Image: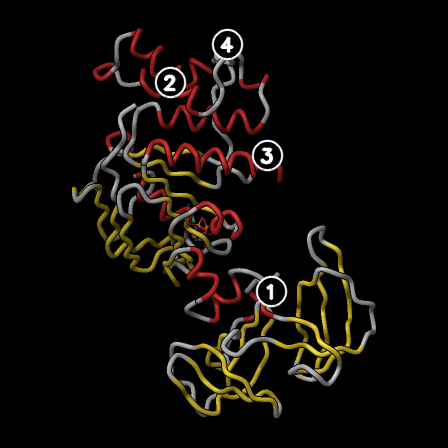
């Protein structure tokens, strides 16, 4: 199999309106060849619309789409060097697995390869997705995970420079989703084709991609590698959408290089931030893994354990303090009602300016 060296995608100034709704508001994005990029964001933020515009299934009101530097904005989907995998496999029920995969090669008579080559490429693709030996089955005789792998094989058989995956795992149950995720990572590693995944599942985006584009209201809020997105969310929205966390309200007393001294009802600590905050009210993000329990009176904030839930590898505690509720992950359970203190290292918290009109109600913190 020849490794793909093309596959860069660029969108410039993409605007898309549906009536009064602005689905995409001048989006710019550059995806280098071979990247595994996830578009992440809440329902309705424009992820699918952006992917459909890249695929050519939707036309933008303004802006340009480039593939390897070539303007493809006006090309129909079948003439773009991409292929798409949908949420619901979209396999032909009356065709065998082999014929479903071969379909991608036989639609255009002019470019239809000879029969032997079709057979060879189908077999190569089924081998790649781990389905060798199942050529003669029909989709109804396969599990959801297997059907989705057939859909991936069908999309890859034409050797696209980029594979566009629209929530391909959302119809699968949790364990199967995990397997398909691993398969996609392996296939991506083997082929080097650019993969673009639309998902609203942050675990999926963080675990599978090298770059994540977090979208909000038709715009890209932050484009970063998963670790940066998790450890250094650029905005309060990104901090709330990605990963679990607690938020405490405080006040920035002074700025320091890379951080600020924050006052929370009399206790002071250093938080990280990339902007000057002195004198402003702030929200401070604290990740559960950065918090630990100590004896009452010996930590930063005293509190009472409100709940303790077992999640297999850890117990999640909620502790009510005078400054708000904190969530922690601990190796052992702590009884409901215990008086404790919560502490965290200097600079573990991340401070964001409190704007006074934060839309907390449409944000996920779990
Ligand atoms: P989800 O995760 O729910 O699929 P999304 O982030 O993919 O959401 P889009 O499907 O791109 O969001 O939709 C963006 C906005 O555009 C939404 O407000 C949606 O209602 C609207 N929209 C999308 N397609 C159409 C359409 N064909 N006609 C009218 N409005 C549309």
Q: Which residue is mark 4?
A: 136
Label 1 crowd (10 A; few <14 / some 14-19 / many >=20): some
Front of the two marks 1 and 2: 1
Label 2 crowd (10 A; few <14 / some 14-19 / many >=20): some
Front of the two marks 1 and 4: 1
Q: CA distance from mark 2 to mark 4?
A: 15 Å
Q: Earlier in the sequence, mark 3 or mark 2?
A: 2
Q: CA distance from mark 1 to mark 4?
A: 49 Å
Callout 3: SS: helix
Q: Earlier in the sequence, mark 2 or mark 4?
A: 2
Tell me the number on the disc at residue 124.
2
Query: Which residue occupies the foreground of this view, 346 or 307?
Result: 346
Question: Measuring 28% from the left and 57% from the top, which residue is drawn there?
Answer: 28
Tell me the number on the disc at residue 289.
1
Q: CA distance from mark 3 to mark 4?
A: 22 Å
Q: Earlier in the sequence, mark 3 or mark 1?
A: 3
Do callouts 3 and 1 mark residues in contact (Cβ within 8 Å)?
no
Question: Measuring 33% from the left and 38% from the top, which residue is drawn there?
Answer: 57
Tell me the number on the disc at residue 344.
none
- Residue 272: where, in percent of width, then height? 45, 77
Q: Classify residue 155 as left or right of residue 73.
A: right
Q: Classify residue 300 as left or right of residue 148.
A: right
- Residue 198: where, in percent of width, then height? 44, 45
- Residue 16: where, in percent of width, then height? 33, 53
């Amino acid at each position: 199999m020849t490794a793909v060296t093309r596959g860069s995608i660029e969108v410039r100034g993409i605007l898309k309106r549906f009536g009064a709704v602005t689905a995409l508001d001048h989006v710019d994005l550059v995806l280098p060849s071979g990247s595994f990029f996830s578009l992440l964001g809440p329902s309705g933020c424009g992820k699918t619309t952006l992917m459909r515009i890249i695929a050519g299934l939707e036309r933008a009101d303004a802006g340009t789409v480039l593939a390897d530097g070539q303007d493809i904005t006006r090309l129909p989907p079948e003439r773009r060097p991409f292929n798409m995998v949908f949420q619901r496999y979209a396999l032909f029920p009356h065709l065998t697995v082999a014929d479903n995969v071969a379909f991608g090669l036989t639609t255009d008579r002019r470019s239809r390869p000879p029969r032997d080559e079709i057979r060879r490429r189908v077999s190569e693709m089924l081998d790649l997705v781990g389905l060798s030996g199942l050529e003669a089955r029909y989709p109804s005789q396969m599990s959801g995970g297997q059907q989705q792998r057939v859909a991936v094989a069908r999309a890859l058989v034409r050797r696209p420079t980029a594979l566009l995956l629209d929530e391909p795992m959302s119809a699968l149950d949790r364990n199967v989703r995990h397997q398909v995720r691993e398969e996609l990572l392996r296939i991506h590693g083997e082929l080097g084709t650019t993969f673009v995944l639309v998902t609203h599942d942050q675990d999926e985006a963080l675990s599978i991609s090298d770059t994540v584009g977090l979208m909000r209201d038709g715009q890209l809020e932050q484009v970063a590698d998963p670790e940066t997105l998790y450890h250094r969310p650029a905005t309060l929205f990104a901090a709330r959408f990605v990963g679990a966390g607690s938020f405490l309200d405080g006040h920035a007393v002074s700025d320091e290089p890379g951080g600020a001294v924050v006052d929370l009802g009399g206790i002071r600590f250093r938080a990280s931030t990339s902007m000057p905050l002195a004198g402003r009210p702030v929200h401070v993000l604290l990740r559960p893994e950065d918090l630990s329990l100590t004896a009452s009176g010996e930590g930063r904030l005293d509190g009472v354990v409100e709940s303790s839930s077992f999640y297999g590898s850890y117990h999640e505690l909620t502790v009510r303090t005078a400054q708000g509720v904190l969530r922690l992950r601990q190796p052992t359970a702590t009884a409901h009602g215990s008086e404790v203190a919560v502490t965290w290292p200097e600079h573990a918290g991340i401070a964001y300016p409190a704007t006074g009109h934060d839309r907390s109600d449409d944000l996920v913190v779990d």
